[in-house]
């Protein structure tokens, strides 16, 4: 029976947080791959393929990879005992038109900086565990000082992204275009506001991939090969 994405993430967290019955030999920390993306560039299918590839590459060590995007939100809420009602507010740029004071008075939303701080803390915890892919929320900037990270930016032409969103979300061309522009602007402002950085700055990434020119599977293999080369001591049987 296929295991759902949430269950995989839950098992991943449990496997890294359970205390062993006997003292374990310290193992190498596997890589953390962060994915920044333009809306509609295909991050989900790329990551789904990348998980399978990295699992194959890590099979000899018995290591399983996990992929966190929206699951990261649930992890933050679970870790910090925040009420489920506020989960929607964790999405970038969803509540700019409402003041933090009003929501705090209503008891529905913690201060914006608190959510960002706790999200940042969770991203760091996941990255330190290793063998994980983290999508969005400035993960590449948050983990930039960690030695086990590899940062990727996925881009594509507006035309291709519109087609992808139309198909994925059953939208008209106009709706898809508006959605893309809004989401991209929200993400850009999120990074600028909290990390004082430009999401489009190529110096923030090890590699930028144009998914117009490769299949999702091909993009995943390209990323996987680059990760293997950077951390060749962990993938001796695959390193060139």
Image (cartoon, helix red, strand yellow):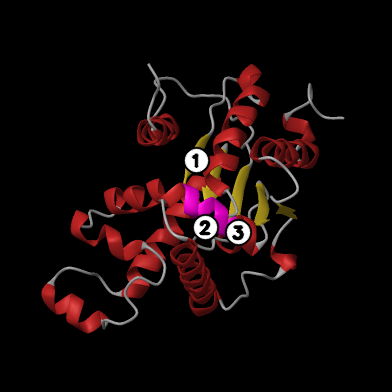
Vertical comparison of 203 with 10: above or below: below
Q: Secondary structure at mark 2?
A: loop
Q: What separation in Å lies between label 2 and label 1 (alpha carbons)?
A: 11 Å
Label 2 CA crowd tier, 10 Å (few <14, some 14–19, many 20+): many
Locate residue 67 relative to residue 234 in the image: left or right.
left
Label 3 CA crowd tier, 10 Å (few <14, some 14–19, many 20+): many
Q: What separation in Å lies between label 3 and label 1 (alpha carbons)?
A: 15 Å
Q: Quadrant of the C terminus?
A: top right
Tell me the mark number nearer the camera, choosing from 3 and 1. 1
Residue placed most toward the observer, 41 or 22:
41
User: Can the viewer see residue 78 in this picture?
Assistant: yes
Quickly name the residue at label 3.
Answer: 140
Residue placed most toward the observer, 161 or 21:
161
> What residue appears at the point 31 percent right and 74 percent down from the top-left corner?
95
Vertical comparison of 128 with 176: above or below: above
Report how many numbered discs are placed on residues in the image. 3
User: Which mark is first along the chain, 1 or 2?
Assistant: 1
Q: Secondary structure at mark 3?
A: helix
Residue placed most toward the observer, 66 or 233:
66
Quickly name the residue at label 1.
Answer: 67
Label 1 CA crowd tier, 10 Å (few <14, some 14–19, many 20+): many
- The image position of residue 40, as x and y in percent, is 55, 56
Q: Which residues are magenta?
A: 161-167
| Magenta stretch: includes residue 72 | no
| Magenta stretch: includes residue 162 | yes
Q: Quadrant of the N terminus?
A: top left
Quickly name the residue at label 2.
Answer: 136
Q: What separation in Å lies between label 2 and label 3 (alpha carbons)?
A: 8 Å
């Amino acid at each position: 029976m296929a295991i759902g994405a949430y269950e995989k993430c839950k098992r991943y967290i449990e496997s890294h947080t359970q205390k062993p019955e006997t003292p374990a030999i310290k193992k190498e920390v596997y890589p953390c791959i962060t994915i920044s993306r333009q809306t509609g560039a295909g991050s989900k299918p790329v990551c789904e393929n990348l998980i399978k590839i990295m699992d194959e590459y890590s099979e000899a060590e018995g290591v399983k990879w996990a992929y966190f995007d929206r699951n990261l939100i649930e992890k933050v809420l679970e870790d910090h005992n925040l009420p489920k009602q506020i989960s929607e507010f964790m999405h970038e740029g969803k509540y700019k038109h409402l003041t933090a004071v009003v929501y705090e008075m209503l008891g529905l939303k913690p201060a914006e900086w608190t959510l960002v701080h706790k999200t940042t803390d969770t991203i760091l915890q996941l990255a330190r565990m290793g063998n994980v892919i983290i999508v969005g929320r400035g993960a590449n900037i948050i983990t930039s000082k960690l030695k086990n990270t590899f940062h990727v930016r996925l881009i594509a032409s507006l035309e291709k992204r519109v087609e992808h969103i139309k198909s994925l979300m059953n939208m008209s061309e106009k709706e898809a275009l508006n959605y893309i522009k809004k989401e991209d602007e929200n993400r850009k402002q999120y990074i600028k506001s909290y990390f004082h950085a430009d999401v489009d700055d190529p110096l923030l990434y090890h590699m930028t991939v144009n998914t117009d020119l490769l299949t999702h599977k091909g993009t995943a293999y390209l990323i996987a090969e680059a990760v293997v080369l950077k951390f060749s001591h962990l993938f001796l049987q695959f390193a060139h």
